[in-house]
């Protein structure tokens, strides 16, 4: 009997799934780069990192890195980064990529990509592929040649397609029954653009979308400072990089005589057409959108800035309306009321009205596997103040937000309003009068600049 037990243990050990603790770099050669048009901004062949478990697995994570965006031949390089500034950098070239970029998957800051079974119990043993963001086009470009005077390549979508072809070549793509397409920031928008396409390439797999910090809204510029809203960069990217967008979304817009396909880069517009289960992780007060696109002052120093932030938060919440109303099997949401861009997986917690708490990685695992989550049985974890229509003005009502000082003035004003003691003079303010002087004139000029850039974008 003991001999049989030993034999069974040996068999179990031999067939146990083990996964590498680090990534391996795969770089396309020049022939493959030509065949698939898979390139970084400077024309260097595309590359990706992978960590494939040594025993056959049927589960894959595709992770798209973030990193802002750039515009080829930018009409306003001081505001919209020109792609030529990314030449030779990590964000525009594969020349510097090595295996040492990812020495260990046990200490990786993204819990979702960790091989640590304790920290990441639901996904630690999945095959993992990480796509560097070296195209500057939200993983949407379809450029098949260098264009403009300095030889810009923007082939983000073609890089995704080339990845799939490579996984087919090495014989693993067709074995997957579960594929999570995930990414953060620009990579989150890459999920939005590419998840439907990936589903068409894996018709027998359950494909799931997991955009983190990628649920961008049509935000307005801060009065007196902001020069444009998000229509300008999205429109320029679509025009310049010949963006691939969700095809069903584009078809419906075209049928409704609304030809601007850039709108399908907006998650709230394209969400009904994703056609897959989705888990959205998004800070209500996304700092990149709030400060870098809308140009709100940081920190939020007076009531005007606080009201702008609250309006922005309501826009984000409204943009999530369709996922919120979608059934819990199909849609999960983790939305803390924090002024942050990429979510703080390790420390951020959302507390339900019941007092129960959850983290992003726990809610994701529970939702994916349809396990009970005590805090949020519907898998829609949204901080209460973001849902509260009578919120007197609290912005970061989550005590686990990284930097409370960014909205300390807003919380001070909200507390005074709740106590009935608020007057303009009752709360000390850091004046932004000089910063915002002549706001009406400046806002009018901003509108003119945005219009001129838009015309430039259309005519080029």
Image: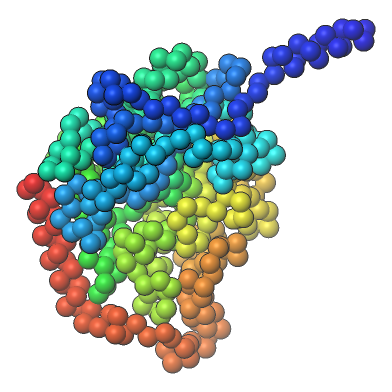
What residue is rendered at 20% in x and 72% in y?
Answer: 443
Name the quadrant containing residue 191: top left
Residue in front for this viewpoint, 367 or 378: 367
Residue in front for this viewpoint, 46 or 365: 46
Q: Is residue 133 above or below residue 201?
A: below
Residue 295: image location, x then y, percent: 32, 67
Taking the image as shown, residue 49 lies to the left or right of residue 190, namely right
Which quadrant, please, contains the N terminus?
top right
What residue is rendered at 16% in x and 72% in y?
Answer: 444
As drawn, the residue found furthest toward the bottom would be: 425
Taking the image as shown, residue 157 lies to the left or right of residue 121, namely left
Taking the image as shown, residue 364 lies to the left or right of residue 273, namely right
Taking the image as shown, residue 202 lies to the left or right of residue 380, namely left
As drawn, the residue found furthest toward the left would be: 459
Name the quadrant containing residue 140: top left
Q: Is residue 61 above or below residue 285?
A: above
What residue is rendered at 45% in x and 35% in y?
Answer: 98
Q: Is residue 435 visible?
A: yes
Q: Is residue 250 visible?
A: no
């Amino acid at each position: 009997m003991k001999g049989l037990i030993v034999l069974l243990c040996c068999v179990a050990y031999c067939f146990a799934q083990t996964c590498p603790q680090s990534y391996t770099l795969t770089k396309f050669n020049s022939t493959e780069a030509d065949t698939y048009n898979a390139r970084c901004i400077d024309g260097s062949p595309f590359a990706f990192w992978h960590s494939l478990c040594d025993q056959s697995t049927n589960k894959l994570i595709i992770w798209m890195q973030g990193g802002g965006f750039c515009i080829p031949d930018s009409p306003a390089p001081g505001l919209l980064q020109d792609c030529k500034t990314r030449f030779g950098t990590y964000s525009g070239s594969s020349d510097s990529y090595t295996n040492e970029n990812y020495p260990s998957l046990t200490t990786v800051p993204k819990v979702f990509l960790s091989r640590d079974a304790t920290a990441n119990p639901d996904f630690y043993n999945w095959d993992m592929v990480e796509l560097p963001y070296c195209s500057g086009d939200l993983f949407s470009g379809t450029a098949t040649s260098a264009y403009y005077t300095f030889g810009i390549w923007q082939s983000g979508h073609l890089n995704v397609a080339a990845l799939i072809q490579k996984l087919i070549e090495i014989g693993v793509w067709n074995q997957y029954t579960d594929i999570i397409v995930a990414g953060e920031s620009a990579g989150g928008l890459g999920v939005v653009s590419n998840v439907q396409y990936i589903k068409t390439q894996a018709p027998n797999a359950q494909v799931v979308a997991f955009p983190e910090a990628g649920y961008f809204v049509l935000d307005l510029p801060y009065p007196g400072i902001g020069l444009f809203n998000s229509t300008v960069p999205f429109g320029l990217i679509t025009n310049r990089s010949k963006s691939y967008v969700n095809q069903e979304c584009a078809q419906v817009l075209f049928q409704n005589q609304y030809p601007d396909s850039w709108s399908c880069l907006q998650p709230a517009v394209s969400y009904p057409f994703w056609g897959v289960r989705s888990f959205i992780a998004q800070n209500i007060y996304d700092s990149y959108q709030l400060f870098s696109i809308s140009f709100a002052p940081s920190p939020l120093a007076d009531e005007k800035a606080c009201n702008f932030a609250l309006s922005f938060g309501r826009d984000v919440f409204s943009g999530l309306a369709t996922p919120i109303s979608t059934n819990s099997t199909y849609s999960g949401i983790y939305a803390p009321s924090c002024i942050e861009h990429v979510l703080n997986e390790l420390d951020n917690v959302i507390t339900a009205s019941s007092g129960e708490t959850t983290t992003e990685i726990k809610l994701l695992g529970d939702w994916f596997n349809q396990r009970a989550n005590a805090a949020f049985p519907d898998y829609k974890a949204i901080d209460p103040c973001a849902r509260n229509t009578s919120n007197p003005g609290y912005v970061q009502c989550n005590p686990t937000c990284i930097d409370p000082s960014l909205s300390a003035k807003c919380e001070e004003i909200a507390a005074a309003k709740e106590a009935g003691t608020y007057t303009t003079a009752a709360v000390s303010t850091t004046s932004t009068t000089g910063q915002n002087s002549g706001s009406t004139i400046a806002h009018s000029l901003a509108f003119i600049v945005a219009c001129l850039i838009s015309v430039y974008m259309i005519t080029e």
